[in-house]
Image (spheres, helix red, strand yellow):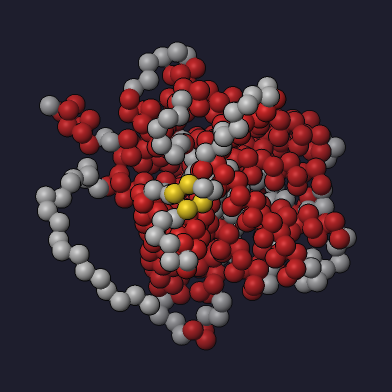
């Protein structure tokens, strides 16, 4: 009876939520060990750091480079890797690799997390995930080592390379450099390698899986041309548009402000890297606090959109944003169906996009209001200029699991840090996943009320 009740309670969604929670608690305890830090830090700071690592956010209250020992940094790196791929996914991957027996529950978790529905070979996808992850992270580490070897001793260069590569691929934003990547602002190799890792890690495993199939068929000159799904096409186009838009806007606004005095190629490189890292990674090669107000607004928007479904990043996701754009266009044209690429989106996809966006807005609004109360109290607006923008920036960064900050993270009160912890946790797992985890199983209504319209707009 107990096992049956437990099986009923532990739905795939709840299992995922609890797995992440367990990883956070274990990480908190490990970081609290005396040999994990140079000087002792509080339990709240340990919890904050562990949550930020597991949720691959990158917000920090203490400097990762100077306050944690090598053991502590390895713990953080391990939490990042587990959080980036997902606890349940990693366990299922090992079972598949070892030719073990995989339960239906685990398969459903992986399908819901990394694919857009049925019809996908889960076993092939799982093998691709582990092989692809190890290959990309190893390649990134090797390329970064080429640069770091000229600056640091051998062992230090190896560790820096591995840490930066894994953190970038998992879109975590943690760095073993106190200034993130500001010291490498003009380094083409470091910037392009890190940007490549961030993009690949944030684009989603299903997209990589389908692109791989497309490339294979092209090389084999197979006649079948329709390989990419609607999801993959949407993600690739929205990602490319956001990267281009961000680069152009950052360059146009900051060319003669924050980037003044730099060679033109460094300005372009810094603008491109900022556009890449803002949507989910959290690294920075320029001083975020020096950005113009317009650039701050652009940054908040990009952080809110975030990465793609089934990836290591957060936010409402690129596909959600694309669906909302398509929905808006269809309504302006008075077309009932939402169409793109000669396909009609299912109503479920449209409603889910709206639900995720509204939930995200609700979470961000609530957390911002609470932080305004805990950090500023009931203070007049004139006495706290800029506080609203700083807190909103922090909350959106936490929800989008980005990790960028205007410098207020370490100064937050204990209650404020707990609020950010909850926002990071919600943002990593996704508003929809949280809602499904705590809600009862779906039930069909026994009757339907009469339909009526209300005035909108």
Is residue 79 in sight in this rendering?
A: no
For the C terminus, the quadrant is bottom left
Q: Residue furthest top?
A: 99
Q: In which quarter of the view is residue 271 placed?
A: bottom right
Give coordinates of residue 19: x percent, y percent: 38, 36
Give the left or right position of residue 90, taking residue 5 as reference.
right
Q: How many marks?
A: 0
Q: Nearer the viewer, residue 410 or 233?
A: 233
247 w.r.t. 142: above or below? below
Give coordinates of residue 151: x percent, y percent: 83, 40
Give the left or right position of residue 385, taking residue 48 as reference.
right
Q: Residue at x 59, y 52 (%)?
A: 238
Q: In which quarter of the view is residue 100 placed?
A: top left
Give the left or right position of residue 103, taking residue 404 as reference.
left
Q: Nearer the viewer, residue 412 or 285?
A: 285
Q: Residue at x 43, y 66 (%)?
A: 334
Q: Residue at x 77, y 34 (%)?
A: 143
360 w.r.t. 390: above or below? above
């Amino acid at each position: 009876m107990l096992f049956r009740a437990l099986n009923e309670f532990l739905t795939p969604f709840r299992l995922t939520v609890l797995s992440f929670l367990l990883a956070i608690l274990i990480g908190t305890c490990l970081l609290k060990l005396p040999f994990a830090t140079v000087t002792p830090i509080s339990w709240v700071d340990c919890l904050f750091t562990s949550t930020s690592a597991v949720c691959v956010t990158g917000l920090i209250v203490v400097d990762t480079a100077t306050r944690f020992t090598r053991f502590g940094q390895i713990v953080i790196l391990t939490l990042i890797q587990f959080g980036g791929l997902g606890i349940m996914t990693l366990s299922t991957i090992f079972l598949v690799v070892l030719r073990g027996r995989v339960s239906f529950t685990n398969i459903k978790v992986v399908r819901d997390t990394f694919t857009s529905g049925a019809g996908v070979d889960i076993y092939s996808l799982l093998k691709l995930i582990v092989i692809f992850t190890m290959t990309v992270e190893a390649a990134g580490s090797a390329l970064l080592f080429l640069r770091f070897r000229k600056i640091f001793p051998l062992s230090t260069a190896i560790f820096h390379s591995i840490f930066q590569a894994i953190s970038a691929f998992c879109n975590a934003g943690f760095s073993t450099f106190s200034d993130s990547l500001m010291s490498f602002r003009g380094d083409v190799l470091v910037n392009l390698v890190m940007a490549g890792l961030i993009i690949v890690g944030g684009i989603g495993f299903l997209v990589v899986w389908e692109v791989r199939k497309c490339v294979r068929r092209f090389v084999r000159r197979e006649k079948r041309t329709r390989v990419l799904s609607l999801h993959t096409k949407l993600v690739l186009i929205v990602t490319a548009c956001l990267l281009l838009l961000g680069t152009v806007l950052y360059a146009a606004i900051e060319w003669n402000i924050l980037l003044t005095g730099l060679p033109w190629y460094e300005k372009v490189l810094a603008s491109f890297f900022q556009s890449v890292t803002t949507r989910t990674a959290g690294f920075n090669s320029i001083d975020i606090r020096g950005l113009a107000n317009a650039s701050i607004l652009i940054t908040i928007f990009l952080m809110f959109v975030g990465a793609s479904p089934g990836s290591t990043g957060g936010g409402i996701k690129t596909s959600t944003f694309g669906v909302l754009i398509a929905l808006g266009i269809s309504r302006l044209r008075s077309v009932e169906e939402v169409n793109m690429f000669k396909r009609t989106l299912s109503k479920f996809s449209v409603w889910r996009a709206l639900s995720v966006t509204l939930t995200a807005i609700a979470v961000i609004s609530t957390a911002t209001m609470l932080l305004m109360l805990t950090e500023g109290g009931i203070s007049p607006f004139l006495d706290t200029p800029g506080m609203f923008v700083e807190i909103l920036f922090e909350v959106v960064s936490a929800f989008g699991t980005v990790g960028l900050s205007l410098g207020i993270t370490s100064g937050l009160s204990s209650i404020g840090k707990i609020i950010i912890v909850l926002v990071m946790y919600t943002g990593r797992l996704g508003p929809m996943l949280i809602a499904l985890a705590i809600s009862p199983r779906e039930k069909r209504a026994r009757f339907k009320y009469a339909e009526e319209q209300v005035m909108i707009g």
